[in-house]
Amino acid sequence: MRILNRYIAKQIIVGFLLIALSLLAMLWLTQSLRFVEMVTRQGLPVYLFVQMTSLLMPRIFNVLSPIALFVAVLFVYNRMIADRELVVMQSSGISPWKNAQAPLVVGLLLSLFGIYVMNVGIPQAEQKFRELEWRVKNNLTQAVFREGEFTTLSNGITVFIDKHENDGSVTGIFVSDESKPDIKVTLTAEKGRMIQTKKGPRILFINGVRQEMNKKTFKFNMLSFSRYSADFNSGSGAKRKEQTVREKSFSELINAADDKTLSPQDVRKYVVEGHRRVLYPFFNMVLALIACTGLLISNFNRRGQTKIIAVEIVCMILVVGNDLALTNLAGRSLYFVPALYANCILPFLICLYLLLFYNPFYFYRRGAGKDLKYADK
């Protein structure tokens, strides 16, 4: 029996990896479109682009994992029925419960891994992603200025570089600063260099002109200089946003009621997120059982198991849909939190009952016996 379980588990794992990686690749491409503008307009390096988009993968994997496992289990058991492998196993006396142990173990392992991802991987990835995003949007050092192109930063500053020199300096630099709504500053210089200070990055201009126009009073000032430095880092005045729900630790979410700075709505949102970090990973095990239960307890049909598969897909959609609906309701009232657990536990218990106690072959033989009795008469 161990050999059969390893055989089934191996096929499930291979199928799960193929489905999960394919879905992750497609969603990675769609998510990466959000950062195309940073690459084209701000000259974001490719390695930084890949790093930012990769930090979104733990969150996406956690959502896709139960569905990918459901599809993999459904495909493996349907193929085993089509190849008569499952029919032979059942004819040799192996019960549906024993045949369901492989997806149950795989689902349990993915559930434990999902708990780690939700409580450790996702918070760390979200913190690194937000830190990197803030640096890219508000830190001038992250922008690679291209020769002969205008680069517009997120704080209303446009920079033009004529040529990059081998020593790291630039020639023919033009800067238009409209970060302040009432004042427009234009800087032109023969040469320039970016320097890093304790307060942040600054640009050193050499042999240039600074022009300032007050849009309200129309007062114009002009200054010629041999050396001039200016701070064009929007991060100096921009404050970082507060931590989101995904960045919080499990203890912070569960004990959100003790935080007096949170509104009642935020407290409910934090508490629900804390419960979901424990509950949602176990949908790997629940959906794996749903996928195999119907195929294991149903009678063999030469025409295929289309009806059983359709019923299992509908059950999966209902469970996942109820989870989303109850999550929204629990965000409004914590009285719906027990319903979240019931939506996960009840399908699991129903599948266990059907696998352990439901015997379709008994009813089949009983009905066949009656037909033979009437035939003899």
Image (cartoon, rainbow, N blue to C red):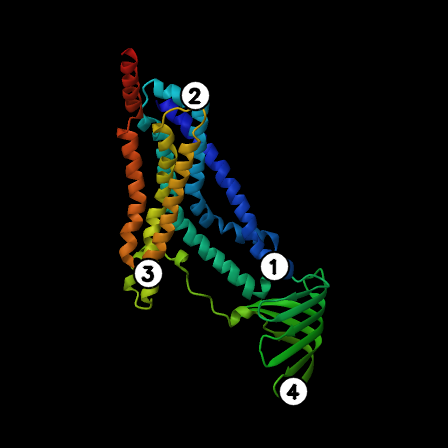
Quarter of the picture containing the N terminus is top left
Q: Nearer the viewer, residue 30 or 278?
A: 30
User: Disc 3 versus disc 2: distance between alpha carbons?
Assistant: 50 Å
Position of 198 relative to 347 (above/below): below
Callout 1, which amino acid?
Glu
Please name the residue shown 40% across and 41% down the image.
314
Secondary element at image label 3: helix
Callout 2, which amino acid?
Arg
User: Disc 4 versus disc 3: distance between alpha carbons?
Assistant: 53 Å
Please name the residue shown 40% across and 47% down the image.
117
User: Disc 2 versus disc 1: distance between alpha carbons?
Assistant: 53 Å
Q: Residues within 10 Å of mark 2 (few under 14, many from 20)?
A: few
For marks 2 and 1, the one nearer the N-term is: 1
Callout 4, which amino acid?
Phe
Q: Residues within 10 Å of mark 1 (few under 14, many from 20)?
A: few
Camera-near label (1 vs 3) is 3
Q: Residue 80: which quarter of the image?
A: top left
For marks 4 and 1, the one nearer the N-term is: 1
Where is mark 4, residue-wise? 218
Q: Nearer the viewer, residue 169 or 364?
A: 364
Q: Residue 215: which quarter of the image?
A: bottom right
Task: Tell me, for residue 37, which label it has, or none.
Answer: 1
Where is mark 3, residue-wise? 332
User: Disc 2 versus disc 4: distance between alpha carbons?
Assistant: 87 Å
Q: Residues within 10 Å of mark 3 (few under 14, many from 20)?
A: some
Camera-near label (4 vs 3) is 3
Secondary element at image label 4: loop
Q: Are marks 2 and 4 in contact (CB under 8 Å)?
A: no
